[in-house]
């Protein structure tokens, strides 16, 4: 009997020891790994649908872009100083169409065209930590100045309503600035500590003058075709809070019936996010009438390209040249 107890105790202790080792082995450190001089290329798409119930109005907008992220230096803790450049933009919305690499049938206004061209022309500089935190960003003010014509054009319908015009000016300015800053915050979904499959962590995302609170879960870890470990992270949206200090519409509307989910693939060995897919939807509730006044849905995707993209520049129309004799005749006149 004593021998049996000894055997059972030994087996039990061995099982416990093995399980502790297994648990430790299942912990993964999901950190970004930068290399000085490397260039990463991401292709993204964003589709937004908004409705206003009282006006029976439904508007859709879709944007596609290609972004280059160049690592120009590294700190001792692995934080990378990066230059972010937008290489291509394609946009279709109720305001018109724009394609930096091709022609369109219904072009946007000259002011909006200039704003797109400013985004293509003005790079951003930022610092991104191994945990995906964007510590600082430069170039936002310069880009905002370049987009002033578009802001002024957007305010023209409110010329006879000074108070409302001021509110809309504040909203447009802060929305554009927030969207510019969020372009380097797409890596902020990584956990602060090592995680095992099944563990969760909380993420706060500042986007479109709202704070989105996500619950992230390490769903699984698998090997890709190159025998690299890939972490699949799932996202579940818990709440959306409007920033009342930055967003004047928060005084009139609040999100209701919030839904959102997403999925991220992270190459653990290379330290790179290779794909992000997110969808968010909510109703817009009036704070005055307590009634639903509209809805909004956003679907976003981003993938890491395996090779640098081939971006064809759009050819600007050339001025028609006249024969030399005709030019001479005009000079004589």
Image (cartoon, helix red, strand yellow):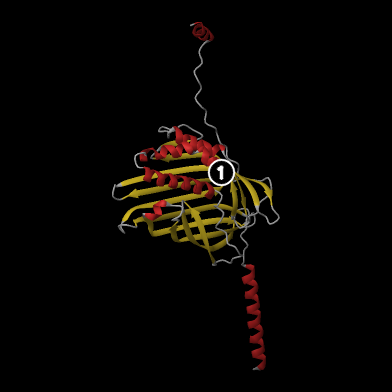
Residue 54 falls left or right of residue 36: left
**Residue named by callout 1:** 67
Q: Where does the image place residue 224, in percent across and percent down from the top left?
A: 59, 55
Residue 303 falls left or right of residue 48: right
Q: Where does the image place residue 315, in percent across and percent down from the top left?
A: 52, 28
**Is residue 259 placed above or below 176 in the rendered structure?**
below
Residue found at the far bottom of this picture: 1
**Is residue 311 placed above or below 80 in the rendered structure?**
above
- From the image, which quarter does the N terminus lie in? bottom right
**Is residue 88 placed above or below 128 in the rendered structure?**
above
Q: Secondary structure at mark 1?
A: strand
Camera-side residue of 65 and 196? 65
Q: Where does the image place residue 327, in percent across and percent down from the top left?
A: 51, 10
Q: Where does the image place residue 8, in percent across and percent down from the top left?
A: 63, 86
Residue located 37% across and 48% down the image = 50
User: Residue 218: which quarter of the image?
Assistant: bottom right
């Amino acid at each position: 009997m004593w021998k049996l107890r000894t055997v059972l105790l030994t087996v039990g202790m061995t099982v416990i020891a093995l399980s502790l080792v297994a648990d430790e082995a299942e912990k993964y450190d999901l950190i970004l790994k930068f290399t000085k001089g490397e260039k990463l290329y991401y292709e993204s798409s964003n589709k937004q649908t908004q409705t206003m119930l009282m006006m029976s109005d439904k508007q859709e907008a879709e944007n596609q872009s290609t972004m280059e992220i160049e690592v120009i230096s590294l700190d001792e803790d692995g934080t990378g100083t990066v230059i972010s450049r937008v290489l291509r933009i394609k946009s279709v919305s109720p305001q018109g169409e724009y394609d930096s690499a091709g022609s369109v049938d219904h072009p946007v206004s000259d002011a909006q065209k200039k704003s797109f061209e400013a985004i293509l022309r003005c790079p951003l500089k930022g610092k991104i930590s191994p945990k995906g935190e964007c510590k600082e960003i430069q170039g936002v003010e310069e880009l905002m100045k370049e987009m002033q014509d578009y802001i002024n054009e957007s305010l023209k319908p409110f010329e006879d309503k000074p108070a409302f015009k001021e509110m809309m000016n504040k909203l447009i300015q802060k929305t554009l600035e927030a969207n510019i800053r969020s372009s380097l915050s797409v890596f902020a979904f990584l956990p602060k500590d090592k995680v095992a499959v099944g563990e969760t962590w909380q993420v706060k995302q500042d986007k479109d003058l709202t704070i989105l609170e996500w619950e992230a879960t390490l769903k699984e870890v698998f090997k890709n075709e190159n025998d690299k470990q890939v972490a699949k992270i799932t996202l579940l949206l818990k709440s959306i809070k409007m920033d009342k200090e930055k967003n004047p519409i928060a005084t009139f509307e609040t999100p209701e019936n919030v839904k959102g989910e997403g999925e991220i693939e992270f190459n653990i060995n290379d330290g790179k996010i290779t794909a992000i897919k997110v969808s968010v939807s909510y109703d817009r509730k009036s704070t005055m009438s307590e009634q639903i006044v509209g809805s909004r849905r956003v679907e976003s995707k981003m993938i890491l390209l395996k090779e640098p993209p081939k971006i064809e520049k759009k050819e600007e129309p050339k001025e028609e040249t006249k024969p030399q004799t005709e030019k001479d005749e005009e000079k004589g006149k």
